[in-house]
Image (cartoon, coloured by chain):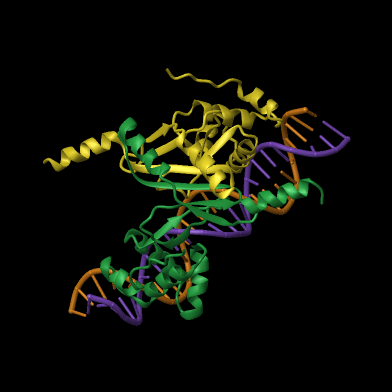
Chain colours: A green, B yellow, C orange, D purple
Amino acid sequence: METPTLPEAPEERLRNAGQRVTSQRILLLRLLDEANDHLDAEELYRRASKEMPDINLSTVYRNLSVLQEAGLVSQRYFARDHSREYFETATPEEHYHFTCLSCGAIVEFETPLISRVRNDLKTEHGVDIRHACICFEGVCAACMESKSKQQRGT
Amino acid sequence: METPTLPEAPEERLRNAGQRVTSQRILLLRLLDEANDHLDAEELYRRASKEMPDINLSTVYRNLSVLQEAGLVSQRYFARDHSREYFETATPEEHYHFTCLSCGAIVEFETPLISRVRNDLKTEHGVDIRHACICFEGVCAACMESKSKQQRGT
DNA sequence: CTACTTGCAAATTGTTTGCATGGAC
DNA sequence: GTCCATGCAAACAATTTGCAAGTAG
């Protein structure tokens, strides 16, 4: 389980993507690699500041934008809080996210159905989908369980 | 074609939803009904101001929120501009949106595949999806056409 | 040496909130 | 009459931008 397919070091990934290799970018990529959860710019900045106290929040924003365009980082939106952007290391496999409205847990999942939607839209409307923003929200298994327990009595 | 299944007048819809009937709310609902495109708060405010010059932007925001919770209005996000919320009259049939990154056109479509994703997630992960935020972006048929023409020579 | 990056401070933008007045029920 | 809705102004929070100094290639 858990195949950490992070092929190259941040430095290499930057070079391969034709981007300048700066200490800030290396740090940000590493922090995103290491994060188990998904980070927003502010949280990434907070973590980066621990290792590089002078790094600036706008540097984080600017680099997230650069790294995203270079395909090294993916930007995501999650439930409730679409007003805040989250980021993760880009992965070759498409995946989507479910957020529990009750406990905040994020479940990642894959499904072939989305690429079928893509195909259907292509044949039915002639449109070429380049990107899909998809996020589900609801109640996770654990919270469903505890809810039904509550209902049966305290 | 085009079955404008808008069952009740704004006033009735408000009453049925147990909401207070104010002239501002009636106006906003009507403007959303009449809009062919999708409106953000600012644009809705602009249109409302023409008929009710004293209406305030914060009234628009507050009512959009109320109407949404009452199930009379749906909030959407579109391509490029997830930082801005768009609104439309709530419809009984679930539908999704595709935005053309080139010309900005929005194509609405239905697909049973999304509810299958919903079911799959339920059985595979035990999660109960309450809401899905889904938007596709890419290039529409017309823009694909003009692009390939361009490539063949000016 | 040149073009791109950074840190810093200030600006921008969509949205929200506090409060006194007005209106729905 | 009571409680909710409105207009107005001010506040917020996430993100962006202008600029001078620093650094990668």
Residue B43, visible in the rendered structure: no
Point 26% across, 37% down: residue: B143
**Callout count:** 0
Position of residue B146 measured from the top left corner of the image (x, y, whole percent): 21, 37
Tell me: B154 left or right of A132: left
Residue B93, visible in the rendered structure: yes
Q: In terms of depth relative to the viewer, which is nearer, A87 or B111? A: B111
Q: Does residue A90 sit above or below B118 in this rendering?
A: below
Q: In terms of depth relative to the viewer, which is nearer, A24 or A54? A: A24
Point 75% across, 49% down: residue: A149
Outermost residue toward the left? B153
Give residue B108's quadrant in the image. Answer: top left
Position of residue A143 measured from the top left corner of the image (x, y, whole percent): 66, 52
Q: In terms of depth relative to the viewer, which is nearer, B102 or A39? A: A39
Tell me: A17 left or right of A84: left
Position of residue B115 measured from the top left corner of the image (x, y, whole percent): 51, 37
Give residue B23's quadrant in the image. Answer: top right
Outermost residue toward the front? A1
Point 55% across, 22% down: residue: B6
Position of residue B42 measured from the top left corner of the image (x, y, whole percent): 51, 41
